[in-house]
Structure formats: structure tokens, C-alpha cells
Image (spheres, rainbow, N blue to C red):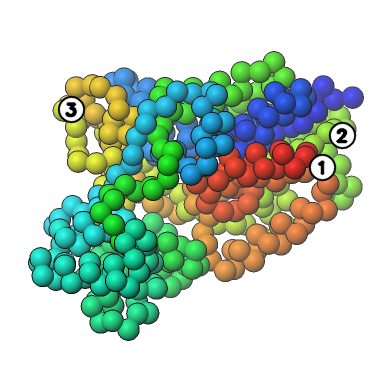
Amino acid sequence: MSMFDYVVVGAGLSGVVMAERIASQLKKRVLIIERREHVGGNTYDYYNEDGILVSRYGPHVFHTKLKEIWGYLSQFTEWHHYQHKVLGHVDGNLVPIPFNLNSIKILFPKPVAEKLSSKLINFFGYGNKVHVLELKETKDEDLKFLADYVYDKVFLNFTHKQWGLRPEELDVSITGRVPIYISYDDRYFKDEFQGVPKFGYARMIKNMLNHNNIKLMLNTDYREVLTVNHLTKQIKLFGQPFEGKLIYTGKIDELFDFCFGELPYRGLELKFETVNREFYQEAGTIHFSNEYEFTRVSEMKRITGQKSNVTTIIREFPKDCNRNDIPYYPIPQQENIEKFNQYKEKAKDYPNIILTGRLADYKYYDMHASILMALDKFKKGL
């Protein structure tokens, strides 16, 4: 008989939430197997040699509309309350991103800006948002002009750098995500609850895993200790039959030995630089749609609220992702979605395997969505 009731593959947010709930609420024993040398997946952060809290895989700002999600995480961390703001370089100006009425005011002569803002408010209502592709379909020539401007100046080249593809080659879930906010609210997220863990995500996640019923194995490929027999659907742990549940948060194609082919991802190369001054830029993140090879620069102190005479910035360079790279973004093309659906259908034949998380669902979830899905699956019964 196994000493564990559940095995969780992956110590990212989804896996950690499941493990914490099982251990604390069901009083069951959980083994977490993590390939990397740390917990937290791509949220992992640490203090660099200059004492600046930095995110190894790029900054993560937590945001949610749901008090339940915020309250759940608040058991394990204090918060630095932070409203994320993003600026973008457009025609030599820094303007709020997503595009809003302030962006229009900065970029266009006053009479033009007033006309465009008035029409947006009259057509769609103040406080609402309209997607650029929807705006392109309006009959009003001024609004079509605005849609083309935002598409060309903000979206087109950024998308090509980010995905290595033109917008028309991507699923509408990406091309439809370019809103114009009809307000003067410059916040990147509009959710009620926003911030970052006061002492970092890694500390928060270690607090979540601080339970006697949880055993953690780092630096371990799950295939070293766990096997799935795809003929009998049986699972073995440390060479012995495992009758419990396997909660799998890794790449779904890897679990099934890439039998339908490999699912592609987009990766990132991150370049860190510590600058000998208090602040480097005007906002937490600045987008570069049409300049340079990198897509954005983030300044960690702007996000974490740390006090220091130096500051650390992160430049993001999107790249192709091979099997051994860290996967960041599933590539939303129809052929990839169809391939994923084959894996998803195959998974239904494995009653002891529960799939959850970005990689297992081949979908780019925001953090709050990953946590919500894990909590919902736990509530429905494991």
C-alpha cells in the first residue's frame, strides 16, 4: 500500500492549491513532484544580489474580482496593494495601455481627440470597452480610423514579436483581446483586488505547502518515480502499484508520450539589469510595439514597492520554444487546439488522473483563473 493518497505533478499554482486543500481539508497524504529546483512554477521570485525582489520568469501581478480567491490566498501572505499601470511607446509618446481616452488625448490634436472620445462614448457608453476588431466593423469613418490606428500602432507588430505570427494566423481568442477602454482609468486591470505578495510568491507558496501531510520532491522528473501504463491505465509510484489519484499539471502531450504529436509553445528570454538609480522608468511595465526586439520592460520596484537606491529591470524577448525550454504561452492556432482536444479526449479513459492548470489544459490562464479552477475541482470532489 502506498504511503501517499495523492500525487501532484508540478508545484505551480494549480498543483500547490490542490495539494494544500487535500492536505488541510481532507487530511490526506500528498506527494508533489517538481522538475525544477523551486516551487511556484513561473511565479517564482527571489532576492537578487542587490537585494531587489525579482521574478525569474517575468513579473506577475495578482488580480481578481472574486473575494473568495483573494481571501483564500490571504491565509498565506500579506499583500503589497498595487494597481498595475502599463505604458506603450506610440509615435514618440508614452500612452496608457490598454488604449483609453487618455491615450487619445495624448496622441491627437485636441479637436480630433474630443471628436473621437465623444463618438466612443455615444456609441458604446462611458465605462465600457470595445475590441479593436469590433470597432473596425462600425460604419462611422472616424471610429474606423481609430481602430486602424490602434491596430497598426499598438497591436500588429507587438503580436508579431510576441507570437512569431501575424494576427490573422492566430485564434480569435488573441486577436479579440485588444480593447479600447472608454474611460480615463489608466489601470491595466480593473479588478477590485490587486497586488503582489508582500514577501514574494515563493514565500507565499512555501507557506501553502507547510503541512505535515505534504511531501515535496524538487529536481525530479516525475517519470523517474512514476509511470503510467497506457495499455492497462495503471499507475506505479516508486515501482509499486499506486491506487490513489494523480493530479497532473504538466504538459498534456508529454503525459501521453506525444502520441498525437507535440503541442507548441512560445517561450521567453529574459534579460535582467540592475541600474544604479532609484527608478528607471515611469510605470511598472512599458510596451515597445514597434521598436527593438524586446516587447516590454518591467521594473520590479515599481511593482513590489521596495525601497532601494538601485533598481532592477527585466527585458522580455519572445522566442520559439523547444521541448527542453520553459513553456510560457500555448500557441492558439486551430490545428493546435484540435490536437489538444485529441489528448483531452484520451484523458477521459484514465479515471485516476485529474488534469488541471495551464499546461494540462493548453490554455494561458491568468493566475486567479488557475486558482479558481483548482478550487472548483477540489470542491466537486476528487
Please name the amino acid that badge 3 sits on.
Glu
Please name the amino acid that badge 1 sits on.
Asn
Question: What residue sits 51% from the left and 34% below the top?
Answer: 70
Name the secondary structure under disc 2: loop
Question: What residue sits 27% from the left and 75% below the top?
Answer: 143
Residue tagged by mark 1? Answer: 352
Residue 49 or 74: which is nearer the viewer? 74
**Vertical position of residue 292 compared to residue 84: above or below:** below
Residue 359 percent location from the top left of the image: 60, 48
Q: Quadrant of residue 25?
A: top right
Q: CA distance from mark 2 to mark 3?
A: 56 Å
Residue tagged by mark 2? Answer: 243
Please name the amino acid that badge 2 sits on.
Glu
Residue 278's tag is: 3
Name the secondary structure under disc 3: loop
Task: For the residues labelled 1 and 2, say whether their Cβ atoms are less than 8 Å apart.
Answer: yes
Residue 90 percent location from the top left of the image: 20, 59
For marks 2 and 3, the one nearer the N-term is 2
Question: What residue sits 59% from the left and 68% below the top?
Answer: 335
Residue 90's tag is: none
